[in-house]
Amino acid sequence: MKITFILPAIGKKRGQKYIGTWKMEPLTIAVLKALTPDDVETEFFDDRIELPDYETKTDLVCITVETYTAKRSYRIAARFRERGIPVVMGGYHATICPEETEQFCDSVIVGNAETVWTQMVSDARTGQLKKRYKGGIGTYGVTPDKSIFTGKKYLPVSLVETGRGCNHNCEFCSISRFYDSRYHARSHALIEEDIAASPYKYFFLVDDNLVANRKNALALFKRIEPLHIKWAGQGTLSMAKDPELLKAMKKSGCEIILIGFESLDKENLRQMNKSFNYALGERDELVKRVHDAGIGIYATFVFGYDNDDEGTIAQALEFSKKHNFYTAAFNHLLPFPNTRLYDRLRNEDRLLYDKWWLADGYNYGELSFVPKKISPEQLSKACRDARKEFSSFGTVMSRGFASLGRTSPLLWGLFWGMNLRIGGEVDRKMNVPIGENLDEFPK
């Protein structure tokens, strides 16, 4: 038996390379490879860096689907199904929208695949695929098999999963819906094993909220401290109120932490059910504590809530420049399916598309709903302009010297490589056609 794994791209303009910062190793594919029996032949096409071979000889195609890649996933699946090859789909979007997804494939895995993958493969061998498999939602004792990445060029950062889910319940978040606002920590022994096996110096600890469980986080940081690595991860500003936690993070090799500020506006935070960000106290002081601990901040903001206009975006930009963040993202709000945000905007008749992820002509960077105080076009442009300003030469220089003063000198090259690339990609990301890879078609 042979299985073909495919990771679809979001989309691609004709004749342009895929966005560089989007090309990190796809950990999900390595986990599925590890779960696959040894007597099953495997191959992997990463649509971000290569076109799938639609004529490949295979017995089963497995596609992992995100909302951004759903349209492209369905089109790829159709090409193989035309040849009579069964297609299995899984991932966050397939779990959140199984009724939609199963219209475009032969079988859907709902939830995490670890508990059902072996059974699915066995059923595929005998031609008895079920229409739907129900997996679990926790973490499991699986070591990813990254041999399936051989020959592919990804960013030189190793992804290591440390946990899944988050204990918060933000209105816009599909992760909280997937995991029912619960956090699931991964085995520290497996985390250490993954780190030891990596050829890279830098790591991204894949975790929706690394500090969701304080006791677990402290134990993990102590466990990996002797490995002398440099790592980045995702957390919340609440860590700044815990000096012991900050010290442990830094000692274990933390150089950059992604923090979702989302908004500086109290009413917006209340509406998105993230008022805990406001309740933490003075943001300036909390940011200073993180920086004083020697940890850089990747700040993220989201705009489109009912109190947003050009002024709130400008405020976030100035806040980010004031604190010389390692980098920052100024994103427009996107209503993912089956989130409370999506349901609210639909009930208020503010959606521009019933399903933006399948809509013809929808491009990356466009809004899919009507904000209250600003037009969709104005908000999209304001976010783009904030990104351009934050990646301007003068701002990058200021941030670079500040970063060098608070993080390891070893990260100097990484800072420039990351920020110059992000700055150069601002306009390239705009108007990427969702679901389309135009290089597949004649000009």
Image (cartoon, rainbow, N blue to C red):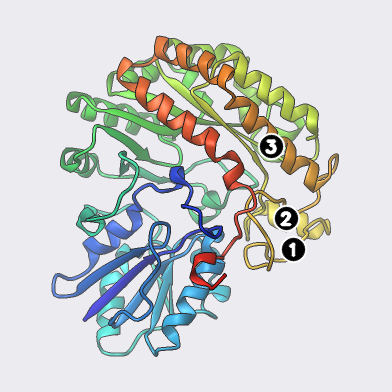
Q: Is residue 276 left or right of residue 28?
A: right
Cβ–Cβ below 8 Å for labels 3 and 1? no
Q: Which comes sooner in the sequence, label 2 or label 3? A: 2
Q: Three-letter amino acid code at disc 1?
A: Tyr
Where does label 1 land, which residue? 353
**Which residue is situated farthest in the left direction here?**
39
The quadrant the C terminus occupies is bottom right
State the SS at label 3: helix
**Which residue is situated farthest in the front direction here?**
443
Quadrant of the rendered structure where residue 59 is?
bottom left
Residue 271's spot in the image, x, y percent?
73, 39
Select label 3 or label 1 by which is in front. 3
Residue 338's spot in the image, x, y percent?
63, 60
Q: Is residue 143 left or right of residue 60?
A: left
Residue 53's spot in the image, x, y percent?
35, 74
Above or below, comparing residue 225 to residue 301 in the picture: above
Q: Three-letter amino acid code at disc 2?
A: Ser
State the SS at label 2: loop
Cβ–Cβ below 8 Å for labels 1 and 2? yes
Above or below, comparing residue 356 to residue 259 in the picture: below
Name the residue at 84% across, 41% down. Answer: 374
Name the residue at 40% across, 76% down. Answer: 88
Above or below, comparing residue 429 to residue 418 in the picture: below
Query: What number is the disc on residue 383?
Result: 3
Where does label 2 land, which residue? 368
In this orientation, does residue 235 appear? no
Q: Three-letter amino acid code at disc 3?
A: Cys
